[in-house]
Every structure is written in structure tokens, then in C-alpha cells.
């Protein structure tokens, strides 16, 4: 990241800008930094000014206690101000939930796009699963068991036990433990894990909700419900794509929405 700006509470935010055209800020999900969405930024660069940043508590950005979702919204406000005063927002997974909250908060957002924000209303037992995850995650982080917190998240995403054991032995595990405290931030962004219908109904700007055709059906249902609940929503399915969407597939769809 080659640029810095400062959020309202004094937190330093690292970001970088790629391309030219209408500005879109890309918001990563859990267990990730701005580097996760950098390939998408490069795919957008011929049609958009793509901004990637490290969310607070990750990568090259700072952090200021106590964490609140409102402070992450203020981070986006600071970034929007730094890149010209208005921008579209795109968020993947829990980053999509943050984008929707920012749009509902009245920031100078031109459009909002999300990819598979994982609201669990549409997964059988989803509410109970989310409640158990929240309790166990907070306990693990309070007790300093970062590795256990990462394991809880990986299980939540459906990763099998053998793959989790393999991840623990991999070189990337130390980096995953380093950002483990931010799992509580994404958990807070997701609230009770259920679709925030009242907040969504207050969003005035156009919203694009995208899902992968090869993802679990409940994620497609959640994305469609987002589009149906906001006043100006559009729903798209990318055939063959999973939660780990390919930039070359998502990029043209997002660019069309941002430049349209």
C-alpha cells in the first residue's frame, strides 16, 4: 500500500489506487487484507479507478480500541473523502455487509455492490449456528487462543477437519493467526447473522447483489433477498462461480454496474 489516510478516531488506513474512470472502493471479507481484492482491482483498472485498502486491524492499517461497526463506516468515509468525495462501494462476503451498512448510513456512496454477503436466515439452523460461533469466537479471542479462533472460522465456512489440520501446518498459518482478532470485527459487522431488512430498505442508491451459480443455494437466496429488499436492487448469478469468485468473471459485471 503506497498511500495513507486517517479515520475520524485517528486510525491510520493504508490504501492504493489503480486505473482510471469512476471510483470504486473494494472491501475485503474476513481473514483477508486489501491484497485479497487487488486482482479484482487490476481487472477493473481499464474502466474504473479501483481503490483497495487494509481494513483496520489488518495489514498496514492501524487499529484503535474499542472496535465498533460505526468506526469501520467512518473508515470508509475517510477513504471516500481521500479519493475525491464520492465513490461506489463493493464488498465481498462480510465486507458486503459492511458496504450495505455504509450505504444505509448516508455516506456519499454512488452505488453499492456485494458478492455473497452471508446472511444466514436462509440456511437451516443458521441463526443458531451464528449464535454458537459468536460465543465460541469471543471466548477463544478473550483467552488469547488465536489458532482456535481461526479454526472456528474455517469450520464455519465448511472446511473439513483434515484440511484445517493441513492449514495449521502450512506457512500461511502464522499470518492467519495475526489477523484472527479481526474475526470479531467481521462478526460484529454481521450482527445477529440475519438480513437487516429495515436497514436495507433505507438504502437510496442502486444496489447490485451477486452470487455464484456453484455456491450453496442459501447464498444465492440471501443475495436475491438483498436485491429484493433494497428499493433499487439488481440480482445477478455468475454461473460456475463459488464464494471464491474469479476476478475475470466478476470484473466485467462490476465494471458495467459502476460505469453504467
Image (cartoon, rainbow, N blue to C red):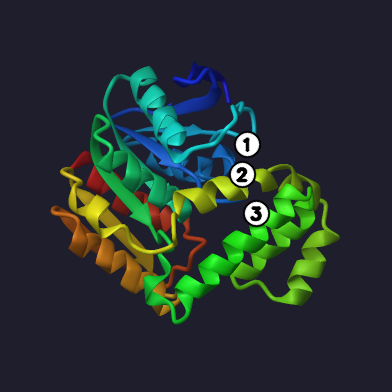
Q: Mark 3 points at which residue?
A: 138
Q: Which of marks 2 and 1 is nearer the N terminus?
A: 1
- Do callouts 1 and 3 mark residues in contact (Cβ within 8 Å)? no
Q: Position of residue 191 (x, y in %)?
A: 44, 54
Q: Where is residue 89 in the image (x, y as percent from the top left)?
A: 33, 40
Residue at image location 60% in from the left, 73% down from the top? 158
- Do callouts 3 and 2 mark residues in contact (Cβ within 8 Å)? no
Q: Mark 1 points at which residue?
A: 58
Question: Residue farthest to the right?
Answer: 169
SS type, badge 1: loop
For marks 1 and 3, give the one nearer the viewer. 3
> Is the residue 241 above or below the residue 170 in the image?
below
Instruction: Identify the disc placed on residue 182.
Output: 2
Any part of residue 17 in sight: yes
When asked about the image quadrant of residue 101, the answer is top left
When asked about the image quadrant of residue 109, the answer is top left
- Do callouts 2 and 1 mark residues in contact (Cβ within 8 Å)? yes
Instruction: Work out how far the residue at label 1 is from the one at label 3, CA to CA, in angstroms.
Output: 18 Å
Locate residue 60 relative to residue 173 in the image: left or right: left
145 or 99: nearer the viewer = 145
Q: Where is residue 157 in the image (x, y as percent from the top left)?
A: 58, 67
Amino acid at each position: 500500500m503506497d498511500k495513507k489516510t486517517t479515520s475520524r478516531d485517528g486510525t491510520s488506513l493504508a490504501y492504493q489506487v489503480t486505473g482510471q474512470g469512476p471510483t470504486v472502493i473494494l472491501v475485503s471479507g474476513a481473514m483477508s487484507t486489501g491484497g485479497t481484492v487487488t486482482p479484482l482491482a487490476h481487472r477493473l483498472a481499464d474502466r474504473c479507478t479501483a481503490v483497495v485498502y487494509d481494513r483496520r486491524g489488518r495489514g498496514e492499517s492501524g487499529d484503535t480500541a474499542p472496535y465498533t461497526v460505526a468506526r469501520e463506516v467512518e473508515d470508509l468515509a475517510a477513504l471516500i473523502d481521500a479519493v475525491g468525495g464520492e465513490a461506489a462501494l463493493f464488498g465481498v462476503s462480510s465486507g458486503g455487509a459492511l458496504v450495505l451498512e455504509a450505504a444505509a448510513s448516508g455516506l456519499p456512496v454512488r452505488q453499492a455492490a456485494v458478492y455473497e454477503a452471508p446472511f444466514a436466515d436462509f440456511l437451516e439452523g443458521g441463526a443458531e449456528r451464528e449464535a454458537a460461533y459468536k460465543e465460541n469466537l469471543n471466548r477463544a479471542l478473550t483467552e488469547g487462543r488465536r489458532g482456535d479462533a481461526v479454526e472456528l472460522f474455517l469450520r464455519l465456512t465448511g472446511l473439513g477437519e483434515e484440511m484445517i489440520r493441513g492449514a495449521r501446518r502450512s506457512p500461511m498459518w502464522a499470518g492467519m493467526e495475526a489477523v484472527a482478532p479481526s474475526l470479531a470485527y467481521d462478526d460484529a459487522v454481521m450482527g445477529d447473522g440475519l438480513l437487516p431488512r429495515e436497514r436495507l430498505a433505507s438504502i437510496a442508491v442502486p444496489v447490485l447483489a451477486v452470487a455464484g451459480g456453484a455456491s450453496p443455494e442459501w447464498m444465492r437466496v440471501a443475495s436475491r433477498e438483498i436485491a429484493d429488499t433494497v428499493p433499487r436492487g439488481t440480482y445477478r448469478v455468475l454461473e460456475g462461480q463459488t464464494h471464491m469468485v474469479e476476478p475475470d468473471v466478476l470484473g466485467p459485471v462490476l465494471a458495467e454496474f459502476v460505469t453504467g
